[in-house]
Amino acid sequence: MTPLDALCETPFHELPDTARARVLNRLADTELFVALESDPVGDRAKLRLFDLPDGKLAIAADLEERLAGFFDAPTGHIAMPGRVLAAMLAAEDVTLMVNPGAGSEMLLGPGTLGWLADALSARPAEEQAGHARLFPPSQEMVARLAEPVATRLQDMSGLLTGAALVAAEWSDGSKGHLLVIEGADDDRRPVIAKAMAELFAFLPPLPQTCDVTFDLPLPAGALVLRPEPPAADNTPDSTGGPKAPGSDPDKPPILRF
C-alpha cells in the first residue's frame, strides 16, 4: 500500500473537501511515473496523451508496475515529483489520471491542477516572534494541527529535531499561534518554513493565524512534537552518477505535448 492508497480508503472523489486536500498535499510530494510515447532522450520527453471531449489526458502512477499494469505492458515513462507534473499539466490545460484502476485512482482536471500549483506557491510569513509572550496553545488549534504537523515533521526527519505549537500575544495586543521549529540548521530554515506554509495552505481555515519561527524558549504546556529518527540508508552513495531524467525538481524535463 502506498501513502496515496492509505489516504484513499474511501475513493478520492467521494472524500470530503478537507480529506481531498490532504490527498493532493501528499500527491505533491509523491514521485509519479508518467507515461511517455517513447523513452526520454536526454532531458526531452513526449507525453503519451489521450483525447478527451474537452482536451487531453495524461496517465501517471505512484508505482512503475501500476503504470505497466494499466497498459498491460512495460511502457516508456519518466519520474518526477507530483508538484512538478501538476504545474506543467495545468499550464497546458491537460487533465491527469493518477493510479487508474487502483483504490487511489483520481481524475484531476486542469482547474484542480492549477489550484494545487497555486497552493504550493504559498510563502511563509516572516514572523518576528522575539517580543511575543508565549502560552500553551488552544485546544482547538491542537486538535486541528497536531496530526498534520506530526506527519509533515516525519517527512522532514533529519532536517530538524522537533516542533512546538504555542499561543502568542504581541505588544500591540494581537494574538495568534506560532509553530516553533527546533534544531534546524540555518541553511535548512527556508525549506522547512516553505514546507510548513504549504501544509497550512492545504488545511481548512484555522480559528487563529499560525506562523512559523525557530528556536524560542517554550512555555509550560506547549505541544511538542518530535519525528522518529530517519532510518539508516545502507544503499551505496550514487551522488556522483547521473540522475534519472525528471528526478531533479530544480531541473525538470522538457515535455512535449
Image (cartoon, rainbow, N blue to C red):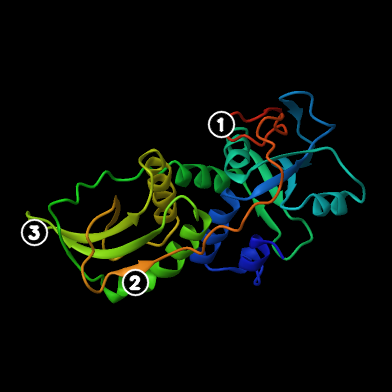
Name the residue located 31 percent from the left edge and 64 percent from the top edge. Answer: 165
Circle 1 residues within 10 Å: few <14, some 14–19, many ≥20: few
Left or right for 100, reference 170: right
Residue corresponding to mark 3: 173
CB contact under 8 Å: marks 2 and 3 = no
Residue corresponding to mark 1: 250
Inspect the image, locate mark 1, and give the three-letter code of the amino acid beneath it.
Answer: Asp
- Quarter of the rendering occupied by the C terminus: top right
Dot 2 falls on a residue whose secondary structure is helix
Name the residue located 79 percent from the left edge and 49 percent from the top edge. Answer: 64
Report x, y in % for residue 130. 16, 51
Dot 1 falls on a residue whose secondary structure is loop
How far separated are the C-alphas under marks 3 and 1?
42 Å
Q: Viewer-proximal residue, 100 or 131?
A: 131
Report x, y in % for residue 230. 56, 57
Dot 3 falls on a residue whose secondary structure is loop
How far separated are the C-alphas under marks 2 and 3?
22 Å
Q: Is residue 54 above or below residue 139?
A: above
Q: Viewer-proximal residue, 37 or 52?
A: 37
Q: Viewer-proximal residue, 181 or 141?
A: 181
Left or right for 165, reference 240: left
Q: Quadrant of residue 161?
A: bottom left
N-terminal of the pair, mark 3 or mark 1, is 3
Depth-wise, is mark 3 or mark 1 nearer the camera?
A: 1
Name the residue located 34 percent from the left edge and 55 percent from the top edge. Answer: 181
Residue corresponding to mark 2: 142
CB contact under 8 Å: marks 3 and 1 = no
- Quarter of the rendering occupied by the N terminus: bottom right
Report x, y in % for residue 106. 67, 57
